[in-house]
Amino acid sequence: MIGVILAAGMARRLRPLTDDRPKCLLSVGGQTLIERTVDAMQGAGIDELVVVTGYRADMLRTFLTDHYPTLRIHFIDNPDYEHNNNIFSLWLTRPLTDGRDFLLMDSDIYCDPALVAHIAAQSGTALAVQRHELGDEEVKVITDDEGYVSEISKTCSIAAAVGESVGIERIAADYSTALFRELEQMIDREGLIDVFYELAFERLIAQGHRFRAIDTTHFQSMELDTVEDFERANGRGQISVVINTYNARQHLERVLKSVQGFDEVVVCDMESTDDTRDIAARYGCRIVTFPKANHKSAEPARTFAIQSARSEWVLVVDADELVTPELHDELYRQIQQPDCPAGLYLPRQNMFLGMFVRDFHYDFQLRFFRREGTTWPPYVHTFPTVQGSVEKLHAQREARLIHLMDETMHEYVDKMNQYTDNETEKKRQKGYGLGSLLWRPQWRFFKKYVLDGSFRMGTRGLIRAMMAAMYQYVLISKIMEQRYRQQDGSEA
């Protein structure tokens, strides 16, 4: 399959940003749009490109030649780009694409690379569709009962449309022959050079040439047409997912699938020795590394990971947690509100001995916040310090994190030992004594079993409450042990 990138336009609405360069050479998150597009196509297995240039053609040609010296790229110039539209640019590619499978992309699309791979992997002819609130400007798509495109244009009925065409299409070889035959009719005989190429798609529908609509709403994508679009793409109003990992392959693939609809996924890896990094790379994550050293938990790497994100907002997800679609939608809704707090405690549903916990309420975790100014103490069982107001998220019940970890009792006790060791360092100045040793475990048992509702889980709930009490007993015993040993040492 060959890739086709249409990059001839002047992008007048983006001036002054495009006074001295084509739109696709503007940067988003430190990388140009054209790099993102080419990298995504290469990631989808495409090793040959056709790039149609126009405005500042020499600059784009030089950039691509310098940055991709081994990639086979055919450059086609659209000399009259000021007076025609993308239909003419597509028509110019005919000598290289007629009768071939090709992936067609506009050069101003900022999207998840996994979206490009998803469309490239389709069989037959297909286009990507994004579901969202529609207006007059979007190229809207209406489908039949089988999911094939029945109408595609800006003038489609908004009420009947299933979404907006993203601007990424997989064209099968037989369809490409019909497409260029129709383009010849439209351009050479009818003079339709200043229209969008989607008009050709719509005319081919009546001739029996079918086009499947693929719902890609769960992938991040946006068309960058205005200065405001670029500001938003560079982090304003966007959410980065941050995942800390160390040998986290067990659940990582499921976790990454659940966060594909966010603007960025950053994996902060602590020098894993399994295939964690390979899995993250396969899903298009940006990978940063924090030295493992002698660290026994992710907390020392949390602040580094958070500050490695590029977006205004950060969602911290552990490598054994899923993000529900409802939580994804709710977080984006929240950040559009003028009174959105700087941080949100998110509800998390846990598992214990093979059963989802049935407490009266979820386990709330402070995982969503503005990136700027946020730090995370390097101790286990701590919450980040957020600059601004912090609230609990109270939304529909399905908007939650799902904790996949279902530890055996052996693993539970091992982790208890590890966590209490780490927490002893944090709380060693506490004046815990005999009263705390007797009272805190009893209170924790009562809270967990009665107030939180673990009694609703039967015997498993009783075990869970007793383990919560045991955690307090072990923690306080270790703190007291440390104090006793220091006293004995000073007396000796």
Image (cartoon, rainbow, N blue to C red):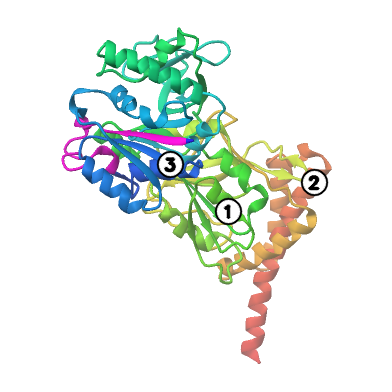
Residue at 21%, 32% (x, y): give it.
10
Q: Is residue 4 magenta?
A: yes
Q: Which residue position holds label 1? A: 278
Which numbered disc, 1 or 2, marks the residue closer to the eye?
1
The front one of 113 and 30 is: 113
Question: In percent of the image, x 42 and y 55: which residue is there?
Answer: 308
Q: Residue at x 38, y 49 (%)?
A: 310
Q: Quadrant of the C terminus?
A: bottom right
**Number of residues whose C-alpha sits closer than 10 Å to that of mark 1, classed few (under 14), some (14–19) or many (20 or more):** few
Q: Which residue is mark 2?
A: 462
**Above or below for 295 versus 261:** below
Q: How many marks?
A: 3
* Residue 450 visible (yes or no): yes
Q: CA separation, marks 2 and 3? A: 62 Å
Q: Is residue 8 left or right of residue 49?
A: left
Q: Position of residue 373 (x, y in %)?
A: 37, 54
The region drawn magenta spans 2-25
List x then y, in percent, for residue 220.
45, 35
